[in-house]
Image (cartoon, helix red, strand yellow):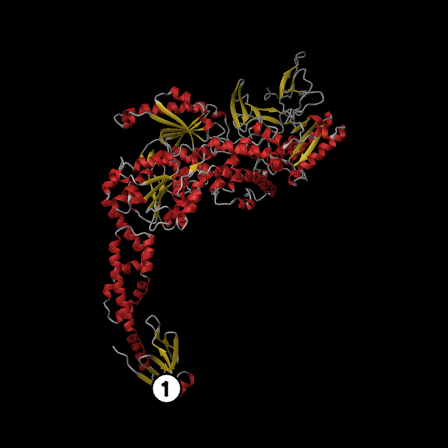
Amino acid sequence: MELRRHAVEFGFLQGLFFAQKASLCEQGLTIDGKLFSYPNIDETVEVREGWFTQTLVWGRNKFTFFRFTPRKPLFKLAKHNRLVFCRPALLQTYEGLLVDIAKFDSEWRLHRRYLRDSDRVEFLKSYSNAFASFKQLDHFKKFKFDVTQLDCRLANFIGEPKSYTAKYNQWWQEKQLVKHQQLFDSLEDNPLTPLQREACVIDENNTLVIAGAGTGKTSTMAAKAAYLVKEGLAKPHEILMLAYGNDAMKELKERVYTSGELKAVKVSTFHGLGKEIIQFYESRSTQVSVLATDDKRFTQFIDQQIDEIVADPKMADPVADYFGRYLYPQVNELDFDTQGQYRTYIKDNEIRALSGDLVKSFQELMICNYLYTHGIDFEYEPRYKAKNGGGVSEPGKSVYQPDFYIPALDAYLEHFGIDKAGNTRPDIDKTAYKLSREWKIALHEHHQTCLLQTFSWQADRGELEKCLESLLCQRCEQIGLAENELFKPISPEEVFIQVKALGVYRNVSRLMSSFVSLFKSSRFPLSDLESFKVSRASQSNDKASAYNQLRWRAFLHLFRWVITRYEQHLTSLNTIDFSDMISQAVKMSGARDFHQKTAGRFRFKYIMVDEFQDISAERAKLVTQLRDSSPDCALFCVGDDWQAIYRFTGSDLRLTTDFSNRFGATKAVTLDKTFRFNNRIEKVASRFIMANEAQLKKSLTTHTVSDNPEVCLLIDSKEASLALAFENILTHISSNASADTGSNSATRAVTVMVISRFKSSLNDLASWQKRHPQLKIRGVSAHASKGKQADFVIVLDVNDDKYGFPSKIASDPILEMLLPQLDVYAYTEERRLFYVALSRAKKRVFVQAELGRESIFVKELMQFKEDVNCHLSELAALYIDDINCPECNEGKLIPTEGPYGVYYACSLGRHYCDTKLESCPSCQSAPMLRNETHHFCASGQCLHQVPVCPECITGKLIKRTNSKSGKAFLACNQHRVNHANSCKYTANLPIKDEALT
């Protein structure tokens, strides 16, 4: 093929509207004397049809001709010449593509390993020109180039790189699994599972192994190291294994170092690695402070600093502010659905005034602390005494107890929870509350006792203390008492002494210690804390938010003092703490001269992290910087988001659940076979944890199978439940003794792990060990149970209580500012912790809770009907779950065995709700409740009822007989002979008295 010349002239009309002359030559197309070069092969050359015209598209140009002009030879030769013109360049592209194909084949043959995402990206980058060349396939065909050579590996890879990579890796993995089958069969007592093997041979830039409880994560890590060395992908010293604690590190070493050729694998804790980096980077030894290694010494140091703060006159105001006003974070009462829920929160978090009184609201706390810090003696919730010395019962309630009594003023103080218009909380009966207030006012007027009143609306306006002070001054004037005889403000030192005496100081010390640790582990400088805002738990209350922000400011004054002296202490002794080990290592590993200064000691090809769900942001940064500083270094992380329970130390679960977005291209493998517990425990535990949709979904299979439910709920006292659990365990052992004959389990002691949310529930286990010497019994907290297992597990005190499960102790908003964000599911971390407790058992797990105080976790497990066994207390038949305490409307009425028979008490406890109801004397199976006219049995089957005494309302009208006349009449059962203040109401006996007793 060769270029051909052609020239044509058109008529007058063509020239008038479009072009008059056109010609073709070696350089291109000339139109009316202007040359337009031949377009590149990628540009368009075509003829487009119109009604009366045709248009020649010439690359970026267009030329129009009338149909009646001699244009066809021009069009034909133009397209021909353009192809001839482009052939040399096209041939060069073709030949270059053949070179790329041969080069790619050669590189591919040399690769001989898993194709990582980074490899795929690098191949695509290297052969980006080939991608464009393959698009010329149709043109190659036109020139009759041999296109059969283009049906090749490179074409397949470039056409669908991700799909081709996946197919290749699948082929590679299968090949590796066959090649190393003997290794995977013999590394552990049992051959590795298919997914464990898959995790070993996958060699992505980042591999995340989700290892459920008992699925063999440690085995997988040890096998991965053995595979890498045997396959020649890394030398032992090029592998780094990281664990969190010394126990986990020792276990890893034991498993990995079983093979002599793996002795050089570096197994370390994060802190150990950080310390080593500091030592080699700075060419000096580092000493860890005793404050880091000894928790008691650290606490003593914090306590000493707080003591010194109190003793410094310059810190008097911050001390008075924090200890006198801001010891407790404040919540909005309206965030709770009922007054009972609010009282439960106050109870669970033990809100104690400086006077030592456990109060029932934050506004009462404010009043108590004001009176105490101003040196005013008072009594909290004393029994009201009339002038005649007798007590008084409020209608429909128990003995009347005003909120406060101030002896120096001989005055009672009631704090009423109403706004300026007299409105109460939405869940409180406004009318009943108003009547109660009116009754109290009338009572004081009747007995001529002084009643001072404060209101919630005053606290909402920030005026409560001011209004209280005004009331106290008015009363002083009224009785002729000098104000300075009443107001005797105490010093900050005295406040602090009282805080210590009450034990509340420990809360301050713990808060300060935790904040120091979290701050040291964070990336924030001290100056940034000024701008921190305490998160709002509620969008409905600016008052609580404002209070908590002021509390944060007061705390920050104290914290600056403590952290400054803490850092000075470390520096003066040339020591570091655990946080320094990580933060300084992060800084050094990111330096340009890092590997130079450390002589390449920390260049690794593989970094493997155990218990990855517990990683913090700073530790993750250290890992990624070490990875990125070494070419082709891969990250292999093993963890289980279901078992993430260390957020309080700074662990961020999002680093696991959002792994690929944070660490880059990732291959995830989920180990789905557990060797610990049976299928019935797995079914309950997995269903429980996956109720939170934020958890990663997985389905576990089990090595052992049971036909019967293996989760037992024991709803009874702790003592009775433990007795039943151990009896059940011994029966289980006895019934399975013959089946275990000859096995290892027949010769070893049966283990029982007793788990509780807090250690305080485990005090009496020694006596149970003495009773059952054939069992190996140990007690651990739920957190300490992580990583352990036992044949049987007993989880104690799963109650709806402060120290129950879930714990009702609220996290301090000050700490929340430095903690990773939680998902919104209720008790999300407590749920994971309970899952950890459930999943420690191999054979059976027992869950104990007290009747009527069962936590939401127990109530949820009760819904798993066919999958759990439930053993109830003997008093369970007397308990009615859908009846709340009539006083607080939050607690439950718990049947309790007393010296005179069964009675019902509120589950919140007598301090927060002193409701105590008798059992129905007729059916003896339900409490007696009260409406406006009658005391009645709460059982729907029993019709027993007794009229309410219209005089005192609290009493019941019962039939009595006049000792002289023998005539029957009705009298209040609250009447006491020779007791002037007891109810004296009597009435004639109605005609129909069958229901009266």
Q: Residue furthest bottom?
A: 12
Q: Quadrant of the N terminus?
A: bottom left
Q: Is residue 113 above or below residue 970?
A: below
Residue drawn 23% across and 42% down? 181
- Mark 1 Cα within 10 Å, few/some/many (few <14, many 20+)? some
Q: Is residue 794 visible?
A: yes
In the visual, does 124 lie left or right of 616? left
Of 552 and 598, nearer the camera is 598
Q: Which quarter of the figure has residue 184?
A: top left
Q: Residue furthest top?
A: 964
**Kind of residue at disc 1:** Phe
Q: Quadrant of the C terminus?
A: top right
Helix, strand or loop under label 1: loop
Q: Is residue 826 visible?
A: no
Q: Is residue 656 above or below residue 858?
A: below
Count of marks placed on residues: 1
In the visual, does 293 lie left or right of 251? right
Residue 88 in the image, given as x and y percentages of width and height:
28, 72
Residue 64 in the image, given as x and y percentages of width and height:
39, 80
Q: Is residue 978 above or below residue 278?
A: above
On the image, numbered disc 1 is attached to which residue?
A: 10
Q: Which quarter of the figure has residue 467?
A: top right
Residue 249 in the image, given as x and y percentages of width and height:
36, 36
Of 737 and 284, nearer the camera is 284
Q: Which quarter of the figure has residue 455?
A: top right
Q: Is residue 608 above or below residue 481?
A: below
Residue 77 in the image, given as x and y percentages of width and height:
30, 79
